[in-house]
């Protein structure tokens, strides 16, 4: 039976209103009590999860930043990181100033986002940032300079394309200029940038290896293209009914949608009392 259950959040574990049903929380607690490690796997940082997952108090680990880190809440430390080197992140932040995007960067779980002269996060990012994110963003008029002051490797860059921007063209431009970076998207108004080779699948494989768990004994749930590497790595790949057509091509099974408690129903089938 599976020893690790890795699940994406938005569109997968979360319903469209960004909540988790009490029934799903109870099922996850039940299999956790049986020794299954429930591993939220998300583009969010470790600082952005506790308030969102307050009903899942049994969680110990989280796969964050699209595979850029795995955090251990019990020991309050990263047990795995795959970051963008400082100098490379500085160059990328300078480059994106000429692109039609509003930039932000993640450092040690905290976001620095485009803001005004008073340090308030700009209204555009406020418009598109999802629930639970804004409290974790420090506004900066010059994001690159604010990042330079931190002088640490970056866990990821997050770019919000402007209203009149062609997101695909922006992504191609950035990928061409920085082949050592991984440029992906998990939404119509979000571009995510990690160091080359980072993805949820690599992080899941490393996590399982660190805990001496065969990767075949993991099950992954997802709905979008940035979940595909994780789905391919896991012993079983489950895609939500609301998942994208491309993501469904990588599924071993399709479960009910995120709004129909698909994870809960699958757990009930696989882990019978």
Image: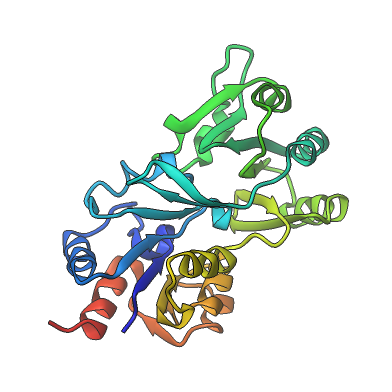
Q: Residue furthest left?
A: 273
Q: Quadrant of residue 114?
A: top right
Residue under the point 77% across and 34% down:
90
Residue 63 drawn above or below residue 232: above
Can residue 242 be spotted in the picture?
no
Q: Judge by depth and name the residue closer to the eye, 30 or 237.
A: 30
Locate residue 154, reporting x and y percent. 65, 40
How is colour applied across the structure in the image?
rainbow
| Left or right side of 76 for 246 | right
What number of labels is visible?
0
Residue 72 drawn above or below residue 37: above
Locate residue 22, reporting x and y percent. 17, 59
Q: Quadrant of residue 92?
A: top right
| Left or right side of 58 for 13 | right
| Left or right side of 171 for 19 | left
Locate residue 19, reporting x and y percent. 29, 53
Locate residue 88, reporting x and y percent. 79, 41
Quadrant where the N terminus is found in the figure: bottom left
Q: Residue furthest bottom?
A: 252
């Amino acid at each position: 039976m599976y020893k690790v259950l890795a699940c994406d959040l938005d569109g997968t574990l979360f319903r469209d209103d960004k909540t988790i049903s009490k029934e799903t929380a109870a099922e996850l607690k039940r299999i956790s009590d049986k020794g299954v490690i429930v591993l939220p796997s998300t583009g969010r940082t470790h600082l952005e999860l506790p308030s969102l997952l307050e009903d899942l108090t049994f969680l110990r680990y989280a796969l964050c930043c699209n595979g850029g880190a795995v955090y251990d809440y019990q020991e309050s430390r990263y047990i795995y990181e795959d970051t963008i080197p400082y100098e490379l992140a500085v160059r990328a932040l300078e480059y994106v100033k000429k692109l039609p995007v509003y930039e932000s960067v993640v450092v040690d779980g905290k976001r620095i986002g485009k803001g005004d002269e008073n340090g308030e996060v700009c209204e555009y990012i406020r418009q598109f940032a999802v629930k639970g994110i804004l409290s974790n963003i420090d506004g900066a008029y010059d994001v690159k300079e604010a990042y330079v002051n931190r002088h640490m490797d970056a866990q990821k860059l997050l770019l919000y394309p402007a209203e009149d921007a062609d997101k695909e063209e922006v992504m191609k431009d950035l990928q061409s200029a920085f082949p050592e970076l991984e440029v992906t998207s998990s939404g119509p108004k979000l571009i995510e940038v990690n160091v080359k080779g980072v993805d949820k699948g690599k992080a899941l494989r490393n996590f399982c290896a660190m805990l001496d768990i065969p990767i075949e004994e993991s099950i992954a749930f997802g709905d979008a293209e940035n979940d595909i590497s994780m789905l391919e790595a896991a012993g079983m790949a489950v895609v939500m009914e609301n998942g994208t057509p491309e993501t469904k091509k990588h599924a071993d099974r399709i479960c009910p949608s995120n709004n129909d408690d698909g994870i809960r129903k699958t757990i009930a089938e696989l882990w019978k009392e």
